[in-house]
Image (cartoon, helix red, strand yellow):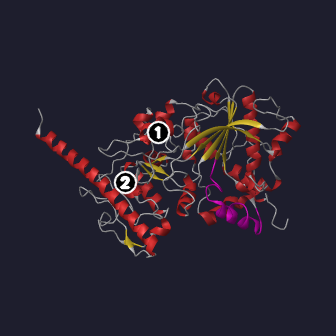
Amino acid sequence: MTTGMDEVRDALKAIAEGQARLLSVVSSVSKRVDDLETESKSASGISDAVKTATVIPLVDGTKTPPLLPADAGSQSPPPILATADTQSGFSSRIILTTYPKQIGIKPLPMEWGEPDPLKRGPVTVSRNSSTIRRRNAIGAHGGSYSIYYALAVASKELAADHVPDFTNTEPAVNIGPFPQWGDKKKIVGMDPWGHMVPWLFKDIMDKDNSIPLILSVVDLRPTIAITKAHMKLSELEDSVRSGRLVPDGKVCINAAGELAVTKFAVEPVWYLPGVAERFGIDEGTLRRSLFEHTGGMYPELITRGDIKVFLPPIGGLTVYVFGDPANMSDPSKRLALRIHDECNGSDVFGSDICTCRPYLIFGIEEAVKEAQNGGSGVVIYFRKEGRALGEVTKRLAVVYNARKRGEDRASDYFKRTENIAGVKDMRFQALMPDILHWLGITKIDRMLSMSNMKHDAIVGQGIPIHERVELPESWIPADSRVEIDAKITAGYFTTGHRMTADELKAVQGRIWEE
């Protein structure tokens, strides 16, 4: 027997569906009007006037979060200057932000931590016309490269309606799924199913019929790619020549030190409640800080508390696996691991002021040896230039100007950075272990790192480290003694001598003139 409440629900549902259909029709008509207007202007040469941005109105008077001004949900937003449609190719109407329960807003279901990917749902972030009302994530694909994507569209080098063709782009090797993929406490900084998006969610991408009488495609894209490649570094030929590496035709392919490697590229995807918990802060504080300190770039961090996923405009990571990738998750196989944070000056251009490239090459060598012995070797490269302070701050303080003007002493190493950046380090390794969980790693036999922050973050996530391997003395460039001795004194791992304050003052690097 139908109750009065059931009738009310049915009526509300019918109204909502009717509003959705109406909105779709209105949007189509509006787009057609814009197109005709653009064609007319193109023919007559009439320039655009000042336009006002329009937002979809609230349907139920839902209040915006307290972090917004009281009038933030107004249906009469302030005017903006719009560039000529004939030049930009965009509609004259801009949806500045959205709110929960608006007409036509129906995010694809997202249950972070659900082990079944179809129940979990795809990460949906595109703002194109076919997808904007179905989004369940804030931000944009590509991390920091999303800005270049925007430039390509604006300059008409890339069609705004381009649809990627994912033919033959399947992962080169199978990975997982592992139990960790379904644990929302263990993976909060990447999408565990990001490498399988075009195939797991093909039906949604081809045709989304969840809103009655409205059929459309949904723009979904991978956030992880897996391939195979060869690696060739000049030092590795020396490694073979000196006997540290022995070619086996499989991992170390030849006398030139060429290596076979499986590569994983990963874009960041943040589950905001989990990220907040890792940093010991509340989600509202995290959202407010992200909004404020990206210049208000993502207002939906504030207006869409129902959306819990954010694709931040930061660099991602790359995993280099030596040997059979299946060995990473096999507890009976030994694993050697190097976690490496980006250092362009040393990694690419060979600056000797730090130990970054030497440790990277040493880590690769040791990873290869472990793979050749029947285990697995893994090197993970994070884009966190200059301790995530950026290269400008790095050149000002961390390695050059502030250090090299005067006395470059180990005792002042971190002070120089704090004077400019306000902190010693912003890499915040709290999210780093996510990639280990995703790879199915449950223990590390040899950790090729001296960093106390990396060690503590990994162990704190329940992954034991059986041995820590420091960079051998013979690998340390003379001018990098300032860096390494300062780090050891600050808590980095060593089996050797830990200097006193007076001894640290005596460690001095060369000045510019040298």
Report the front residue among 350 and 148.
148
Q: Which quadrant holds residue 338?
A: top right
Q: Is residue 248 above or below residue 197?
A: above
Which residue is at the front of the view, 248 or 417?
248
Q: Residue 263: x percent and y percent?
A: 65, 39
Q: CA distance from mark 1 to mark 2?
A: 22 Å
Question: Disc number at residue 222?
Answer: none
Three-letter residue code for mark 1: Lys
Q: Is residue 433 visible?
A: no
Circle 1: element type: loop
Residue identifier under label 1: 185
Q: Nearer the viewer, mark 1 or mark 2?
A: 2
* Residue at point 40%, 41% (across, down): 207
Residue 204's x, y, as percent? 42, 40
Residue 416: image location, x then y, percent: 67, 63
Which quadrant, please, contains the C terminus?
bottom right
Rendering quarter of residue 300: bottom left
Kind of residue at badge 2: Arg
Disc 2 secondary structure class: loop
Residue that carries the numbered disc 2 in the rendered image: 304
Span of residues in magenta: 382-408
Mark positioned earlier in the residue sequence (1 or 2): 1
Q: Are marks 1 and 2 in contact (CB under 8 Å)?
A: no
Q: Residues within 10 Å of mark 2 (few under 14, many from 20)?
A: some
Residue furthest out toward the top: 332
